[in-house]
Amino acid sequence: MLKLSKERSEPDQNDPAYLISYAHHLERQARQLETEKQMVESERLRLQREVNNLKVELERLRSPPLFMGYIVEVLDNKTAVVRSTTGPNLVVTISRHVEIKDLKSDARVALNQRTFAIVNVLPPTQDPLVQKMELLERPTETFKDIGGLSAQIQELKETVELPLLKPELFEKIGIDPPKGVLLQGLPGTGKTLLAKAVANETQAVFIRLIGSELVQKFIGEGARLVREIFEFARENAPSILFIDELDAIGSRRLDLATSGDREVQRTLMQLLSELDGFNPRGDVKVIAATNRIDILDPAMLRPGRFDRIIEIPIPNAESRLAIFKIHVAEMNLKGDVDFDYLIQMTEGVSGAAIKNICTEAGMFAIRSERDHVINDDFTDSIKKITGEKESTSKQTTGFI
C-alpha cells in the first residue's frame, strides 16, 4: 500500500497541466536571472567608471608639479616672455590649449616643470580678507531712520548716489563727479549710520573695512592689501568703499618714527596713491569716517581725494526731537511724553546716547513689571545716563 501511494504522488511528466506549470516556473526563473544579470551589469559599469576615475586621479598625482610665473610680454601666438618665481625671465612656448587673449601683462600662469611651457592661466591672487569685506546682506537702516542731518544727507546723496545713478548729468554739465566724501564728527553722531543708510539705498556693491585692518604685521602686506581692495572695488563697480576709523591709518606722518610707524606710513602712501593716482577709479566711490580729523595727514584732506568733508554735529533741539520720535515709534507708550522736557534735559547729547536713553527707559518699565513705558521712565533714564556720564568724566579728570 505504501508503494502504491508513493507511485501515485509522483507527477506524470506527460501531463499537459504539469508541462504548462513547469514552463511557467522556468519563465519565472529566466526573468529572475535576467534581472540579476542587469543588476550585475550595472554594478560592473559603476565599478568600471570608478576604476577609470582612479586611473585619471593616479595619472594626475604622478604628473610633475608646475611652476608659477608671470607674463612679461607676449611675442606671438606661440611664444611669450615670462618672469619665473624661481629664476630669471624666460622665453617659453605657449600650449595650444591656452587662449592668447588671456595672456595679459602680469597674469599668473602655470609653467611645465621640464620645458617651462605655459600650460594654464591661473586666477589672480586675492586676499580672502578682501572678499569678506563685501556686505552681502544689506543693512536695514535707511535715511528715514536718521533724525535731523538733512543737509548732510543731501550732500551725501549728491556725492555718492547721484554720480552712480545719473552720470549723464555730470557729462552734460562738463564736470567730473566728486570722488569721495569724509564724514567727521564726535562719536555717536551718526557717521556709521549714514554709511549703513547709503549701503541700503544704493544698488552698488558695498565694501566696508576698518582702518586698523590695514595695519599688517609684515612689511608690504598693508600696501598689498590696499591695492587688492581697490582692485576688488574696480572689478565689482559700481561700488562704494567705506573706510571706518580712518585716523587709525591716515594719521600725520612724523620724521621720528619706529619701524612699525614706518610700515603704517607705507600703507598710508599706498592709500593716497589709490585715492588719487594714475589708475582711474571708475565707478568706485569712497566714504571715510573719523573722529579725529585734527590728526589726519594734510595730504589725505586735499581736494581730489576727498572732495567733500561733511561735518556731523551734535544734534540740536529739532534734531533731538526727530531722533526721539524715531526710537519711540515702536515702543508701547502710555500717557503723554513730555518731549520738550526731554529735549531740554539732553542738551549736548549725541544721537547714540538718545537711543541708549530710550532703551534704558524700556528697561525701567521691565524692572517695574509693566508692559508699557511712561514719561517717568524717560526722565529716570536721562538722570541715569547723564549721571553715569558725569561720574565717568570726574573719574577721568581725577586720574589725569
Image (tube, rainbow, N blue to C red):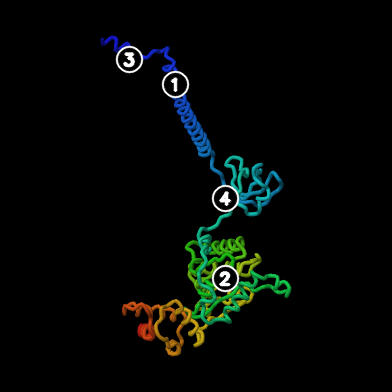
Q: Is residue 363 above or below residue 212?
A: below
Of marks 2 and 1, the one in the foreground = 1
Q: CA distance from mark 2 to mark 1?
A: 77 Å
Q: Is residue 255 visible?
A: no
Would residue 121 be visible to someone looking at this image? yes
Q: Which mark is residue 26?
A: 1
**Residue linked to disc 3:** 9
Task: Determine the CA span between mark 2 and mark 3.
Answer: 93 Å
Query: Left of 18 or right of it: where is 220?
Result: right
Residue position marked by numbered label 2 in the rendering? 201
Task: Name the quarter where the C terminus is drawn.
Answer: bottom left
Residue 140 at x, y percent in the picture: 50, 70
Q: Residues within 10 Å of mark 4 (few under 14, many from 20)?
A: few
- Residue at point 66% right, 47% down? 99
- Name the residue beneath numbered marker 4: 85
> Which comes before the other along the chain, label 3 or label 4?
3
Alpha-carbon distance for marks 3 and 4? Answer: 92 Å
Q: Which amino acid is tagged 2? A: Glu
Residue 398 in the image: state x and y as whole percent: 35, 85
Question: Which one is earlier in the sequence, the residue at label 1 or at label 3?
Answer: 3
Q: Earlier in the sequence, mark 2 or mark 4?
A: 4
Instruction: Describe the element under mark 1 as helix, strand or loop.
Output: helix
Q: Mark 2 or mark 3, which has the lower sequence index?
A: 3
From the viewer's perspective, tell me whether residue 5 is left or right of residue 232.
left
Disc on the earlier residue, 2 or 1: 1
Which of the two marks, 1 or 3, is nearer to us in this view?
Answer: 3
Query: Is the residue 77 above or below the residue 358 in the image?
Result: above
Badge 1 amino acid: Leu
Mark 2 residue crowding within 10 angstroms, few (<14) / some (14–19) / many (20+): some
Q: Secondary structure at mark 2?
A: helix
